[in-house]
Image (cartoon, rainbow, N blue to C red):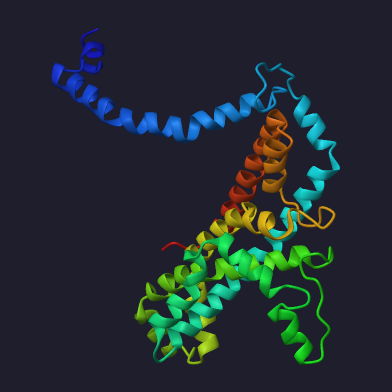
Amino acid sequence: MAAASAAAPAAPSPDDRAEARAGYALAMPAMALLFVVLLGPSLAVVVLSLTDWQLGAPRMNFIGLGNFEQLFADRVFWRSFGNTIVYCLVTVPGSVFLGLGIALLVELAPAGRTFYRAAYFLPVTSTLIAMAVVWEFLLHPSVGLVNLALEAVGVKGIDWLKNPDVALLTLAGIGIWQSVGLNMVLFMAGIQAIPADLYEAAEVDGAGGAWDRFCTVTWPMLGPTTLFVTVVSSIRSFQVFDTVEVLTKGGPNKATEVLLYTMYTEGFSFFRTGYASAVTVVFVLIVLTFTLAQVRLGDRRTHYT
C-alpha cells in the first residue's frame, strides 16, 4: 500500500491550477475565433445539406440524405465534376513545371533577376476579375490580339470562349498564367536554399554538366518544395470560379461549368441553399481526399533531410 501511495501522482498545487486557468483564458479568444470563422460555418453547411431550406424561406424540413441522392443522380453535377478534374489535370502540371523552368532560368540570368521576378509575379498580385476582362478582349474572335496574331502567320482564329471543344482548355491556360508566378517564387526560394557544397561534391563525382547537376542535386533537394507547390496549385485549381463567372458563365452548354460555379448558381441563382450545401460538402471532401492522397504519395518520394 505504501509503494502504491508513493507511485500515485501528486495533486496539482494551487499555482498549477492557476497557471492552467490562465492558459485556457489566453487560448479562449483564438478558439472562439476558430469556431466562428471555420468550425461554425462548416457545421452550419453540413446541417443545411440535410434540409430542403431555400434562401429566404421561413422554415426548413429535415430530409436526411435526400440532397445527396439527388446530387449523385444529377448530370450537371457530374459534368461540373469532370470539368473540374480536367481543369486541374491541365493547370497543375502546367503551372508547376513551367514555374520550375522559369525559376531555373531566372536564377541563371546574369542580370535583371529583380525585374523578372516582378514581371512573372505580377499576375498573382493583380485582381483576377480585372485580368479576366483583359483576357476577354485578347480572346475576342474578331478583334482579339490572339486571333490577329494567328491570322498574321496564316492560321485561322477561333472563338476561344464559345467553342465547347477549347473553352475549358482556354480557361486552364489562363489559370496557368495566373499561378506560374507564385510557383516560380516558391521554387526560387527552394533553389536558393540548396547548399553550394552539394554542387561542388557533385562536380567532383563527375556531374559537371547542367543537366547532371539538376538531376543529381537540384531536383532531389526540391522535393519538399515541389510537394508544397503541387498541393497549393491543386487547391487553387479546384477553387477556380472568377474566370468562369466573368468569361463563360459555365458555357457553352456547360462545357466550362466547374464545382464552385455549380455551388454558386444553385445557392444564389436558384436559391436552393440545402442542395448547394450538399454540393459544398462533397466539394470539401473531394479536395481533402485529393490533397491527402497527394501528400501521402509525394511524401514517400520526398526527402526532408
Q: Quadrant of the rendered structure where residue 203 is?
A: bottom left
Q: Residue furthest left?
A: 15
Q: Is residue 279 left or right of residue 125?
A: right
Viewport quadrant of the N terminus: top left
* Residue 151 shows up from this direction: yes
**260 or 92: nearer the viewer:** 260
Q: Is residue 174 left or right of residue 270?
A: left
**Residue at the spot x=82%, y=58% of the render?**
252
Q: Residue furthest front?
A: 143
Q: Is residue 269 left or right of residue 226?
A: right
Q: Is residue 157 above or below residue 264?
A: below
Q: Is residue 100 above or below residue 274?
A: below
**Residue at the spot x=81%, y=80% of the render?**
157
**17 or 26: nearer the viewer:** 26
**157 or 187: nearer the viewer:** 157
Viewport quadrant of the C terminus: bottom left
Q: Quadrant of the rendered structure where residue 25 is?
A: top left
Rendering coords of residue 92 (x, y %): 63, 64
Rendering coords of residue 223 (x, y %): 51, 66
Q: Is residue 76 left or right of residue 249?
A: right
* Residue 301 shows up from this direction: no
Rendering coords of residue 166 (x, y %): 80, 68
Rendering coords of residue 173 (x, y %): 67, 69
